[in-house]
Amino acid sequence: MLTYGDLKNHVLLAIGGRPSTASGQTVAQRQAEIVNIAGEHLFTHPWKFREATTTVNTVVSQAYVSLPSDFAELTQVWKQDQPLWIQSPEEVETARQTNFPDLTWRAYVKTIVPTQAAPTQSYRLELYPTPTSIEALKVLYRNGWTSVASDTADSTVISIPKHVEATLISY
């Protein structure tokens, strides 16, 4: 199991000592930044280990469902045994505005940008038509890198498969 402490040690080894820091930045903050850059780079690839599935329930008269906190990329959505039609935001909005008379469900992913009230980025799946009953949706997606911070405990386990650890370390 690879830990954050292991990755910090690899950072020191790779650069030959303490990393350079920007004005006002601590060594611990720079190490976390380097680890996050490597992790985010690793997670730009569509590796199999990133694939995940979850079930979310629609809410009556609510045109969206929230996606998991580790969500990064949508691959498929199923309603019972039928796939939803994944479209662009413009196409779904056009269908909403024109009350498009179609029984085919449509969806797109909307990014909820961080604000002071909600400081973390989140995602939701916008739906058309607006649900009139509670429906279970099976969401297939790729998860994203979970960022570390300068105060993350060294014993924190990095959640990647054993066979991927060397790839992360090489970044």
Image (cartoon, rainbow, N blue to C red):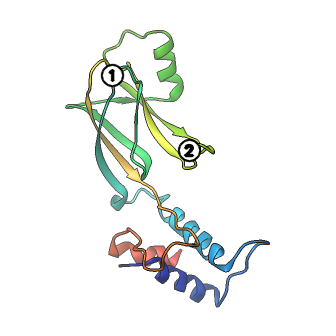
Q: Is residue 142 above or below residue 2?
A: above
Residue type highlighted by circle 2 = Ala
Give the secondary structure at mark 2: loop
* Residue 156 image position (x, y, % from top left): 43, 74
Q: Does the residue at mark 2 contact the one at mark 1 (Cβ under 8 Å)?
A: no
**Whole-percent x and y of residue 106?**
38, 25
Location of residue 46 with respect to 10 vertically, above or below: above
Residue on which the image places disc 1: 60
Whole-percent x, y for residue 103 in the image? 31, 15
Label 2, residues with CA under 10 Å away: few <14, some 14-19, many ≥20: few
Give the distance between the C-alpha atoms of the residues marked 2 and 1, in whole angstroms: 24 Å
**Left or right: 136 as drawn, with respect to 150:** left
- Going 48% across and 76% down the picture, which residue do you hit? 153
Report the quarter where the N terminus lies. bottom left
Left or right placement of residue 61 versus residue 37 in this view? left
Question: Mark on residue 118?
Answer: 2
Dot 1: within a 10 Å radius of its alpha carbon, few (fewer than 14), some, or many (20 or more) residues? few
Q: Is residue 87 above or below residue 17?
A: above
Residue 117 vertical placement versus 150 (above, below): above
Near-viewer residue (121 or 145): 121
